[in-house]
Image: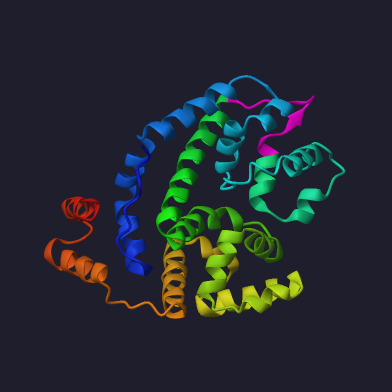
Amino acid sequence: MVYQPVIPLTGYGGWKFLESTFDKQFEGFTDSASVRNDREYFQEKMSSPVAIEDFLSDRRLLRISLTSFDLGGEEWKVGFLRHMMEEQADPDSSFLKRLNSPAYTAFATTFTVTDGKISLSQDTIASLADDFERAAFRSAVGNVDNNMKLSLNYEAKVGDLVREGSSDEANLYRLLGDVPTRTVLETALNLPTSWQQLDVDQQADILKERVLSVFSISKITDLANEDVMDKVLQRFHTMDSIANGQSSLSSGSVALTLLNNAAGFGSTASQNLFLSIVSS
């Protein structure tokens, strides 16, 4: 049985609850048999070179590998994955650049095909197994509340997307190319869906202007700062709640407020108490 994350609140209150209980919940999730078995299966299968045909035909191995890059559920795209991996091995190919998907680029770069086989170092295998656990937990969170999954994705990925030393243009294109991150920013900035019909250069210009203005920052790379991440996610949940007409005075919010006032919600005792209440 897989551990099901506990998120008793919607909106920003739910996000802060998930943040404060993350370590305990993540530990419970990774201790579940199915997650442990998947990790061990991946490590065993990738411990020696794997032919691309065997890799693509092993749906379990492919699912675990793709999940490591937050691409779980894409394993049915075997033809596309084969094409992408073969193009990555071609130094003259511009396919991945035109695709503009940081996740797929990272996947294809990691699972490089050489002489028809994929070979990973032990360090890479261990790192991908860790990434699988974190991404699988985010997916489990999404089964409870997709906005919480989007928030976890944003927190985990934005630092990789906006890089010191990269141009604003490159950073903005990576933000636009990562769908979960883009979704968070679009909601937080209250951008209309129609803006996606604009030329990508126009989208980048609008995104830059809005990000710098709304979050009072001087450069795009400031998005990776912890305090700015919190501002973005607070606004994301607030704007989503407004758009969906959610009340901030739900029963869960009242319970959270009572716990905050009574014992200090950040304490381990109050977190455990609340987890036990909502799990019963």
Specify start and end residues of the magenta stretch as a single range: 109-121
**The N terminus: image quadrant:** top left
Residue 64 image-quadrant placement: top right
Determine whether, in the image, residue 71 is placed left or right of residue 140.
Answer: right
Q: Where in the figure is residue 153, as x and y percent of width and height?
A: 50, 55
- Which residue corresponds to the image point at 69% horizontal and 32% vertical from the top-left? 56
Q: Does 171 appear in magenta?
A: no
Residue 200 visible, this orientation: yes
Residue 217 visible, this orientation: no
What scheme was used to colour the molecule?
Answer: rainbow
Q: Where in the figure is residue 69, as x and y percent of width and height?
A: 58, 45
Q: Where in the figure is residue 268, as x and y percent of width and height?
A: 20, 50
Q: 91 above or below 270?
A: above
- Which residue corresponds to the image point at 62% horizontal and 19% vertical from the top-left? 48
Q: Where in the figure is residue 279, as x and y percent of width and height?
A: 24, 51
Q: 201 above or below 90?
A: below
Determine whether, in the image, residue 229 is placed left or right of residue 8.
Answer: right
Q: Residue furthest top?
A: 48
- Which residue corresponds to the image point at 17% horizontal and 55% vertical from the top-left? 270
Instruction: Give whichever of 248, 155 is nearer the camera.
Output: 248
